[in-house]
Amino acid sequence: ASESGSRVGLGTRLASSPSMLFRQLFDPSSSTYTYLLADERTGSAILIDPVMEQTTRDIQLLRELGLTLLFTLETHVHADHVTSSGVLRTQLGSKSVMSAEAGVGCADRLVGPGERVEFGSEAVEVRLTPGHTPCSLTFVHHESGRVFTGDALLIRGCGRTDFQGGDPQVLYRAVHRQILSLPESFEIYPGHDYKGRTVSTVGEEKRHNPRLGEGRSEAEFVEIMNQLDLPRPKLIDIAVPANQRCGFETLGRGASPDRADPETGAWAPIARSPQGAPEVSVEWVREHPEGVQVVDVREPEEFEGELGHLPRAQLIPLGTLADAVSGLDPHRPLVVVCRSGGRSGKGAKLLEELGFKQVASMAGGMLRWNATAAPAAASCG
């Protein structure tokens, strides 16, 4: 059965893995597919190509299904939508996975050909399939016979090769060697579809893909691709730089607590929780020890308890926060902290209502602060 906002292939046999849960989700504005895979026994999950505008949907689905998001996987640096990988890391503690060829510093894990991304007892194999972009990846779940091809291979088509370092000759060879060489029964799940199609198979694409199948030679494919006259992607100037920062570019370009963006006023890479609270990551707070006010809204015994508190934190229990705002500077950025992020989210929303413009809850609270004893080596914050 499909989830709200998702599409599933009708009348198509789905291969099975005894413990794997699978959902195909859809973003109508960019015609992007996001894929949720999870080990039902452990609740460990991954998302392939998550979309910023669908963050609330994806978090809600994970929570409804009782899943823990371990990784977000990007098939490439997208030019047509902004990823939510950085926001999901901030809110859920997941790690972003990208190709080592991408030259992107925000990813937690850079992968190459033949590596496995494991989630519980399940895993996907990484295959390098350049040509649409030099960093394009395909992910193969062998046990269920599912192949997640991004833009390298679409249903009866393929990604364009005329920008972002694309190369039709490279794409032809990569698709034939890394995707169409798989068993013909393996199911193809692309990054996009613009005609309502949801799934194909290796065998179907070998026989019916008008660009890469039907016995097309490499020379014929190169000629086809070089003759395409496609419009420039509308979001490329926004999406590419944003995705090079795991989606945070659109939330706060060059943001720092002592220099807000003059156009947007952004002082940090702010995300919104499903409850609407502004949030900033633990990693960002750790990397900016000066320049922000820190308010801890727990009770005094918690403040001095086993989780400890931030060295510069001011204790103001949530129930007294509204009466204590006179002691806070409304013109300086302010980070609200609690045990896990719930009370601090309420506190941040309250301060917004009281006129504070630069305020955010520290996502994950002191639990996440203590669980990440050192800042990540490659952080988008």
Image: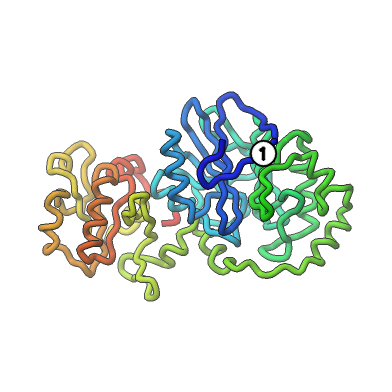
Query: Residue drawn at (59%, 24%), measured in percent from left and top?
Result: 18
Residue 79 against residue 37 in the figure, above or below = below
Instruction: Give the SS element for disc 1.
Output: loop
Q: In the rendered image, is residue 111 in sight?
A: yes
Residue 282, how many percent across, how many down? 34, 50
Pick the residue in front: 319 or 162.
319
Question: Is the C terminus in the top left, top right, bottom left or bottom right quadrant?
Answer: bottom left
Residue 162, how many percent across, how many down? 73, 65
Q: How many marks?
A: 1
Work out which residue is located at the far bottom of the displayed protein and give it: 262
Left or right for 171, reference 371: right
Disc 1: which residue: 10
Please rate how many residues cluster around mark 1, counting C-alpha atoms within 10 Å: few if below 14, some from 14 to 19, many from 20: few
Residue 195, how many percent across, how many down? 69, 53
Left or right for 9, reference 22: right
Residue 15 against residue 355 in the figure, above or below = above
The amino acid type of the residue labelled 1 equals Leu
Query: Residue drawn at (34%, 71%), measured in percent from left and top?
Result: 259
Residue 137 against residue 380 in the figure, above or below = above
Q: In the rendered image, is residue 143 in sight?
A: no
Residue 25, how many percent across, how many down? 56, 45
Pick the residue in front: 61 or 146.
61
